[in-house]
Amino acid sequence: MQRIEKAPAKINLSLDALFLHDDGEPEWQMVMTSIDLADYVQITLRDDPAIEVRTSSGFLPEDQRNLAYKAAQLLQHTYQIPTGALIEIDKHIPVAAGLGGGSSDAAAVLRGLNELWQLGLTREHLARLGLQIDSDVPYCVYGETALVTGKGDQIKPLGSLPNFWVVVVKPEVSVSTPRIIRALDCDQIQQHPQTEALVAAVEAGDLNAMTRNMGNVLAPITTERYPVIKQLSERLLQFGADVAQMSGSGPTVFGICSQYSRAQRIYNSMSGFCAEVYLVKPLKP
Ligand code: ATP
């Protein structure tokens, strides 16, 4: 038995950290959405208990370090499943980019094996399990625009977004999320996103108010280490994006704009500065 799951990238319309828990993990407050840039995860059931991961990427770990492997192992152990699975990941989401690719692959495995092993788990349950893998997995189990709080485990879907295009630009640097979070001091944050106003704007379908209230408190930390992020954000604005922002802990930046023709011009212009540029739409719920 076999299943193919789409594993979309996420972007942070906002990312805020309110305080650090005793274990060093932030209390997050984020608005996330998924975009039409995705990995494809093919899951084939095996008769023996082995879990095997293969990726198209060439340099990603394919053992227990792969988040998709961890997801399969977690379900197998928790529900004492005697058989295993072959997981083949067709990678399109840039790695270590702030786009949640590994977490989305893990969420796709949770969703896919829940069906194939007929576990009948709700997505709330899958999301709770997913938190054991990575803080972005619960959101990725939902994969629709949501307010995400707690350690990443409280997910409140927000419904449809207003219409817009996203130009995603991934500079040629990789960022370690734990390293950026270790440098985070919640008392020193200069500017927080206006989360409440952002949520209201999303719910009202008001794109102008949405773009006015976005923000990412990790952006100054990552940008200090990789100034290219600031340069690319400035170029996105210069070429006509309504707003430009870093996603997650970076280094990917994205620009938002309402008109396709303008988005395409921005895409063409940015392609002159960066090898990895994508023109995509948010996914519909
Ligand atoms: P996050 O912000 O959630 O850490 P990210 O988008 O910045 O996500 P990922 O692409 O998920 O980063 O990769 C982060 C790390 O996870 C990398 O070091 C990578 O080797 C490891 N990893 C494990 N499994 C995967 C996977 N299936 N796809 C991508 N990276 C993976």
Image (tube, rainbow, N blue to C red):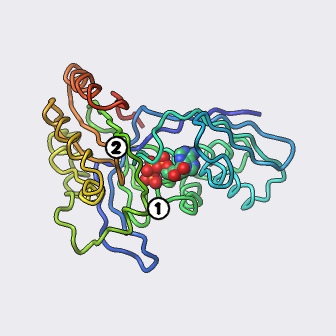
- Category of crowding for the residue at label 1, using alpha-carbon neighbours closer than 10 angstroms: few (below 14), some (14–19), many (at least 20): many
The answer to whether residue 119 is visible is: yes
The image quarter in which residue 74 lies:
bottom right
Label 2 packing within 10 angstroms: few (<14), some (14-19), many (20+): many
Q: Looking at mark 2, is its residue's CB closer than 8 Å to ligand 1?
A: yes
Between 265 and 207, the one lying in front of the other is 265
> Is residue 142 visible to us here?
no
Q: Secondary structure at mark 2?
A: loop
Q: Residue at the far right: name it.
A: 48
Q: How many marks?
A: 2
Q: Residue at x 36, y 35 (%)?
A: 282
Give x and y (percent) for residue 149. 38, 62
Residue on which the image places disc 2: 252
Give the side of residue 135 with respect to residue 284, left or right. right
**Which mark lies nearer to you, 1 or 2?**
2
Q: Residue at x 46, y 44 (%)?
A: 143
Check disc 1 and give the amino acid type: Asp
In the rendered view, would you say 93 is above or below 84?
Answer: above
Q: Residue furthest toward the top?
A: 261
Which badge, 1 or 2, comes first in the chain's sequence?
Answer: 1
- Residue drawn at x 80%, y 48% is 50
Would you say 77 lies left or right of 36 here? right
Per the image, label 1 sits on a secondary structure element best described as loop
Residue 131 rendering spot, x and y as whole percentages: 53, 61
The label number, if any, that marks residue 153 in the structure image: 1
Which quarter of the image is occupied by the C terminus? top left
Residue 94 lies left or right of residue 15; in this view the side is right
Q: Residue 264, position in %: x, y?
A: 25, 21
Asked if the residue under mark 2 is in contact with the one under mark 1, i.e. CB atoms within 8 Å, the reply is no
- Of the pair 81 and 269, the residue shown nearer to us: 269
Q: Residue at x 40, y 76 (%)?
A: 21
Disc 1/disc 2 C-alpha distance (Å): 23 Å
